Amino acid sequence: MNAITPSLTSSLRVSEELREAILSGEFEPGERLRTVSLAKRFGSSRTPVREALVQLEGEGLVDIEPRRGALVRSFASADLIDLYEIRALLEPEAAARAALRASGDQLDRLRSLVVLSDARAGRTPAAIDDQIAWNEEFHAVVIEAAGSPRLSSALRATAGIPRAFRTAFWRDDEHRAFSQMCHRELVSALDARSPERAAAVMRMHIVRAKDSLVEAMNGR
Amino acid sequence: MNAITPSLTSSLRVSEELREAILSGEFEPGERLRTVSLAKRFGSSRTPVREALVQLEGEGLVDIEPRRGALVRSFASADLIDLYEIRALLEPEAAARAALRASGDQLDRLRSLVVLSDARAGRTPAAIDDQIAWNEEFHAVVIEAAGSPRLSSALRATAGIPRAFRTAFWRDDEHRAFSQMCHRELVSALDARSPERAAAVMRMHIVRAKDSLVEAMNGR
DNA sequence: GGGAGGCACTTTGAATGCAAAATCGTGGCT
DNA sequence: AGCCACGATTTTGCATTCAAAGTGCCTCCC
């Protein structure tokens, strides 16, 4: 999605690319993010890099220590559980609002994302990457459909966790099947314009994901 | 607490002061925040001002439109209601966690804030300002005591926003008395280490505040 | 008289320069 | 041998500078 990013400002482009790089696990948690090397990598000066780092700090992906610089935030297990518990509070509300406000286009997009995921049920790395991307977009569309800027930004602050962790549970067939079922059920609830149902499904979905994560982490 | 702010970096100092300025209603909602005048005001160059603006955008106090600059975010009534509904989701959770984790110092501080507010029950502007400050600190301490960085960052600016509407809120004796009662009750729940009770009280507190706000806005 | 176009001024966004703090390695001292 | 101090180097944070986009005003034409 979003093949064309106009990227009006360099700052925004850098923050996008850096966010992707962090989420894809390219940097170790705790690793220092030096402005010069990032600037070189993104073909800009240090100024937009610094602004991007401040923005990503707000999203919870990096820590900035004064006079010491930026680090990739560590995703310790307690922190990840924390993250999911907050999502479990916010996303059901987003789903409920989406049930009342989602546009036809948005519902169509959600439906097509479900169909895509159903059709691509492999376990190759590429298939898993697709699954992850579609899953992210699915949740992003629901949040967008909720039409609450505050909710959106609050959830952005709980931004994605490194995909390295996600592969842990996207490899699990059972979890994936359950997730797909939740998505289907959620679309159905949104179609039915039932906020209670949408919220309940979303809550179940998130809590289950949290448990799968805990299980995956314990299993190693 | 934190009477001395070391202000290691200029960027942090600017963001603090600018946050205060916005929350105190010094700028009109929708007003453009020009980097040169802010830099002049804070005695710095535009660079730290820009970083502060990015940070405050993440906190939801400012909107940045690419190539156009920063605006004070408007707190339209729908937006404020939205905000309170999110607080109503998050702060009860913060209170519940605080019930489990609050330190003795934190509980003492909460108790003393309640005492301070009880002792200073005037209606002069200065008294109201004190009430507002203590109320904000009360909520800040509870959130801090929850010990969840994600929750803290999601809630950072939210408690301060109603300061712009102080007249609506804090002049109403009934609301103020109820608020004080909630704070007392919350301290009691935290003392008793009862997360359920703490969450329930906090939820009531926030929902009541939302209704008071709606009422105040309709009443004019 | 009203609207479109153009020109000057303003403001943003990005690059660069510079001072201060932090980091790292080395050597000396106990 | 271990530890501390000190200097070189790196890196941050801020100021300044420059180009490009935006804004507003004024004129000219219809």
Image (cartoon, coloured by chain):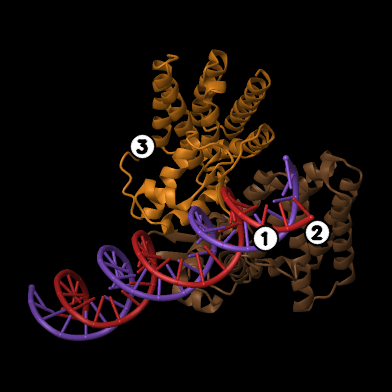
Chain colours: A brown, B orange, C purple, D red
In the rendered image, residues at marks 1 and 3 fall on the same chain: no
User: Residue A57: percent from the left, percent from the top?
Assistant: 52, 58
- Name the residue that disc number 3 marks: B1
Is residue B146 rendered to the left or right of residue A135?
A: left
Measured in 3D between alpha carbons, the distance from the residue under mark 1 to the one under mark 3, in whole angstroms, is 38 Å
User: Residue A202: percent from the left, percent from the top?
Assistant: 78, 49
User: Residue B35: percent from the left, percent from the top?
Assistant: 46, 52
Identify the element where label 1 is drawn: helix
Q: Amino acid at mark 2?
A: Ser
- Name the residue that disc number 1 marks: A213
First in residue order: circle 2 vs circle 1 = 2
| Residue B24 makes an appearance in the image | yes
Identify the element where label 3 is drawn: loop
Q: Nearer the viewer, residue B57 or B109?
A: B57
- Name the residue that disc number 2 marks: A179
For disc 3, the chain is B
Q: Quadrant of residue B11?
A: bottom left
**Residue sitting at x 66%, y 32%:** B77
Q: Nearer the viewer, residue B32 or B136?
A: B32
Q: Nearer the viewer, residue C14 or B118?
A: C14
- Nearer to us of marks 2 and 1 is 2
